[in-house]
Image (spheres, rainbow, N blue to C red):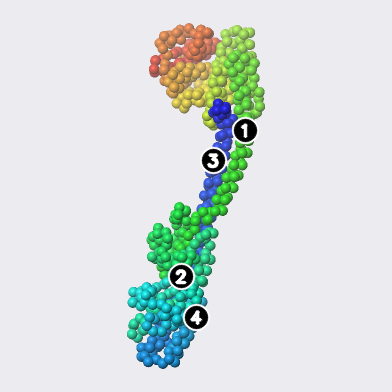
Amino acid sequence: MIKWLKRLLFEKVSTKLIAMVLSLILLSATFISMTYYGSSVSIIGSHVRASTKQGAKQTADYLSLMLTVGTDMGQQIFRNTRLQEVLNQERQGHLTVDQQFEIKDSVGQTLNNTIYSSSFVRSIYILRENGESWGSGLFNASKVKRYTLSGHEWYSDVVSDKANELWLPLGYDPFSGGGDDTELVLTLVDAFRNLKTKQTEGVILVNLDGQLILDAVQRIQLGKSGTWRVVDPTGQVLISSDSEQWGRPLADAGLAERLASQNEEIAEFQTKLNGEEDYVVSVRMANGWRLVGQVPVKEIIGDIVSLQRRVTMYTAMFLLVALLVGLMFSTRITHPLKELTRQMKAIENNNFKARSRIRSRDEIGRLSLRFNQMAGQIETLIREVEEAGTRKREAEIRALRHQINPHFLYNTLSSIRWMIKLGQTDNAYKGIAALVELMESSMGKASVFTTIRQELELLDKYMVIQRFRYGEGLSLETSAEEETLDFEIPRMLLQPLAENAIFHGLAPRDGQGIIRLDVRRQVHPPAVRIAVADDGAGIEPERLATLLRGEAEENRTGMLGIGLHHVQETIRLYYGPGSGVDIRSEAGRGTIVTLTLAPKEE
């Protein structure tokens, strides 16, 4: 089972093709999903924040207006002429009971008339430690008597002039009605002074409608569980929908410090509370308080997360479809390659009747077609060699053998096959394309001769294939005079020289090096000189001497002798006196093979 899995994962081209397709789809889907998710979060988040800030700003302005009305009411009561007259009457003393009742009714009417001028104000009280206390509406004087006013910090601070005025947190009015906690109010405590004596007689309580304030704050939409609070510069909560927070400092000390350091009118930031990321928006009110909203970030982008799950589900479905398509696609790719490889092995075993079935018109189909043509030509030429036996036909069949050497094709296809196995599909397709072009160029004409220009182009295609085997460190540099490019030479005359330079010069050095090919016209005597040089390992002196004497038998082993013998025979066959092959080599420095091609005399 383990061996089968290893073969499936590491030796099957189809598995790697499917993995490649699935990986591309997965990467694409993930990239698109993440990009869409990030963009959606940014867009929706910005819209939510803009809407929230706008609502918070409007509410902060509304609350600031209410506080301003409360402050103005306190000043109006403090400077009321009738109330100042009452203080002066009390200073004179000896008030009768009727006068006291008249004062109480008069002050109550004055306070009632004042609160009727604004819907924000629920009640106004004047509280004194020494003397009568008055109030509007349902003011209960008996409740005042239960309190020791001087025992309350808010009363003592204002009466002792430590604070000119102060605001109490949202709470229930303790001096109203017959029961307790009957009315929710936000209270301003202001000093009640005698303008004549400048002495503080008590305090003025202006009670704003607490329920109206809470409704205004709770109308701001902030997710599903978002909360709003009003805090003073010290971090004390003055207004909140949670009554347990009234008058207490913010539970998150870090949040309180950050709010205190904010100088902007409207600020927004994210903070962690109990390990959860929260979005916070803060708007400064006219008196320095801040309206603060807080909500978990996930609530703002909750719909986007749901959409992300759906995208993930659709991606999984697409991957399943891609798996099926990949199986079909890989089968169409690998099956022809496997069959072509089997036919290559048959050719290697001298079965030149081997033919590959053509299943498509793409590069693989074209390669199969060229292979079939190659096999047919090889079979025909071998038959001609066996029948004719002339030197010319022998030279041609050797050229054809070098041109379409089954070992070369087999090695090339094996390299392409390994590229596909290793996931190098781009290089594999480039190798197939180069091999197809090489075979098309080499088999496109029936003529034995071609131009140097075409031969160099063919050599470039050959080098492309060799680079896939030896790497980019293998290079070919050509230099040819323009007037020599149309000079005709036998086909595949230069490839054996390049092949020898690679296999015997550069291959011992890991296939790294440069082959330089130079083509020049010789004036006296008229000829074309072609020099092929490499910077490889060179040829041993004993071997070089043998080659220079032309002692290269047909049964020798090794490509060096066969290739040079083919070139020598071809030159002897087609060119005149003065033509030949010259070899100069130095061990460790490289080899230079020079061909001199002089035309035959007519």
Q: Secondary structure at mark 2?
A: loop
* Amino acid type assigned to the residue bearing label 3 in the image: Leu
Q: Nearer the viewer, residue 374 or 417?
A: 417
Q: Which residue is mark 2?
A: 170
Q: Residues within 10 Å of mark 1 (few under 14, many from 20)?
A: some
Q: Quadrant of residue 319?
A: top right
Q: Nearer the viewer, residue 349 or 506?
A: 349
Q: Position of residue 219 (x, y in %)?
A: 53, 66
Q: Secondary structure at mark 4?
A: loop
Q: Position of residue 182 (x, y in %)?
A: 50, 74
576 in relation to 3, above or below: above
> Looking at the image, is mark 2 or mark 1 earlier in the sequence?
2
* Amino acid type assigned to the residue bearing label 2 in the image: Leu
Q: Which residue is mark 3?
A: 27
> Looking at the image, is mark 4 or mark 2 earlier in the sequence?
4
> Looking at the image, is mark 2 or mark 3 earlier in the sequence?
3
> Looking at the image, is mark 1 or mark 4 earlier in the sequence?
4
Q: Position of residue 481 (x, y in %)?
A: 48, 23
> Looking at the image, is mark 3 or mark 4 earlier in the sequence?
3
Instruction: Name the residue located 56 percent from the left edge and 53 percent from the top edge.
Output: 303
Q: Residues within 10 Å of mark 3 (few under 14, many from 20)?
A: few
Q: Which residue is mark 1?
A: 327
In this orientation, does residue 450 appear? Answer: no
Instruction: Name the residue located 51 percent from the left edge and 19 percent from the top edge.
Output: 495
Q: Quadrant of residue 103?
A: bottom left
* Amino acid type assigned to the residue bearing label 1 in the image: Leu
Q: Which residue is mark 4?
A: 138
Instruction: Name the mark nearer the viewer: 4 or 2.
Output: 4
> Would you say the residues marked 4 and 2 are in contact, meaning their CB atoms lie under 8 Å apart?
no
Q: CA distance from mark 4 to mark 2?
A: 19 Å
